[in-house]
Image (tube, rainbow, N blue to C red):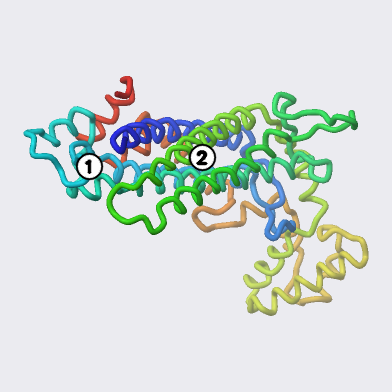
Amino acid sequence: MATDERLYLRRRISEITNLLTELQRALLSKAEQHFGAVMPGYTHLQRAQPILLSHHLLAYVEMFERDKSRYADCLRRLNVSPLGAAALAGTPHPIDRRQTAKTLGFAGILRNSIDAVSDRDYVIEFIATCAIVMMHLSRLAEEFVLWSSQEFRFITISDAFTTGSSIMPQKKNPDMAELVRGKTGRVYGDLINILTVMKALPLAYNRDMQEDKFPMLDAADTTAACLKIFSAMIASTTFNVEVMRTALLHDYATATDIADYLVQKGLAFREAHEIAAKIVSYAIDHNLLLPNLPLETLQQFSPAIDEQIFEVLNPERSPARKRSEGSTAPKAVKAQLNFWKKALSSIVHAAENGLGTAERKRAKKQAHQQEP
C-alpha cells in the first residue's frame, strides 16, 4: 500500500503540475493581451498606487511557480521505494529491492525498513502543498468575486461560470469562483485530518494509517478540479480595462508620486510624505482631483514644486517612472512577460526538475505509461 500510494502521488503530482502550468499560461495570455492597461493597485483593499494590470496578473504566475517547486520537492522525497520492507523488519527471502525500485521508476529505496512501513510524510507533504495551492486559488477567486461586483466592474465573468439568482433575475453570481474559495477549506481539512491521524502513532504500522486514503485522494481531486475550472474561467473572462482606468483617474493614487517627486527635489521623505498628505487632504476637501489643482495652490504647500508636478500627477504615467527591477514599469513588466513566455513554453515540467537526470528520464517515461 505504501508503494501504491507513492506511485499514485507521483502521477498526480505530474498531473497537477501540468494544470498549474496551464493556469499560468492562461494568466500570461491575459497579461500579454492587456499589456499597458493601467489599474489601481491595492493595499488593505484601499487604492494605493497606479500599476499595470499585467503586473498584477503576473504576481499570481509567480505564486503558482512556487507551488510547482514545492511539488517538485515533494516528488524528490517520495520517489523512493518502500517495497520489500515486509511488515517492519525485512524478509529472509532472496529479494532485490533495488531491482524492483528501478523497474517501478523509483530513484532508490528507503534505507530503513521500519521507516518504510510507518512513514506517511509524503502524504502529509503532498496535501500541505495542495493546501497552499488552494490558498493561492482562493486569493485569486476572492479578487474575481470582488472585481465582478457592481462596485468594481473590473471584470465580466463568462455566463458559463456564473449563475442567476433564484428570485432576483438581474443578478449574475460568480458561483465558480465562490466554490473554489469555499473548497479551500475542504483541503485545509484534509491536511488537519492526516496530521491528526499521524499524531502520536508509535512505530511501525498502526491501523489508524488506513485513514490516510480519504484526505490524500480528496486533496488531489479537489485541487485538480479547481485548477481546471480556474484556467477555463480566466480564459473566458473579459477584463474591463477602461473601467479600471477610470477608477484610477478618479482617485488620489499618485500621492506617493508627489512624495517621490519632492524627494528628488531634495526633501527628506518624511517631510515630502507630510506635504503630499496635506495636498491630498486639500483636494478632497475642495472636491478636486490632484491633476486639477492649480500650480499656485500646489506651491503653497512647498516652494520646491514647479510645473513638472503635472507630469507626476498623471496616474497613467506613474508606472513608467518606476526604475527598480521587478517593478510595475512597462519595461520591467515586459521583461517579466518575456521570461514567463519562454519559461512556460518548456516541455520539461517543474516537478521533474527536482529529480536527477536518470530519474527524470524514468519519470518522463512513467508519465506516458499506465501506472502499475
The residue sitting at 18% across, 37% down in the picture is 84
Earlier-in-chain disc, 1 versus 2:
1
Total numbered labels: 2
Horizontal and vertical percent for residue 237? 68, 31
Q: Can the viewer see residue 63 in this picture?
A: no
Tell me which amino acid carries mark 1.
Ala
Q: Is residue 56 left or right of residue 126?
A: right
Q: Which residue is mark 2?
A: 337
Q: Give the class, few, some or many, for how many residues have Cα within 10 Å of label 2's Cα (few <14, many ≥20).
A: many
The residue sitting at 46% across, 53% down in the picture is 196
Horizontal and vertical percent for residue 371? 32, 24
Q: Can the viewer see residue 113 in this picture?
A: yes
Horizontal and vertical percent for residue 314? 74, 54
The residue sitting at 23% across, 40% down in the picture is 82
Q: Give the class, few, some or many, for how many residues have Cα within 10 Å of label 1's Cα (few <14, many ≥20).
A: some
Q: Using the image as rendered, state which of residue 199 and residue 342 is in the foreground.
A: 199
Q: Is residue 276 left or right of residue 135?
A: right
Tell me which amino acid carries mark 2.
Leu
Q: Which residue is mark 1?
A: 87
Does residue 222 sit above or below 245 in this rendering? above
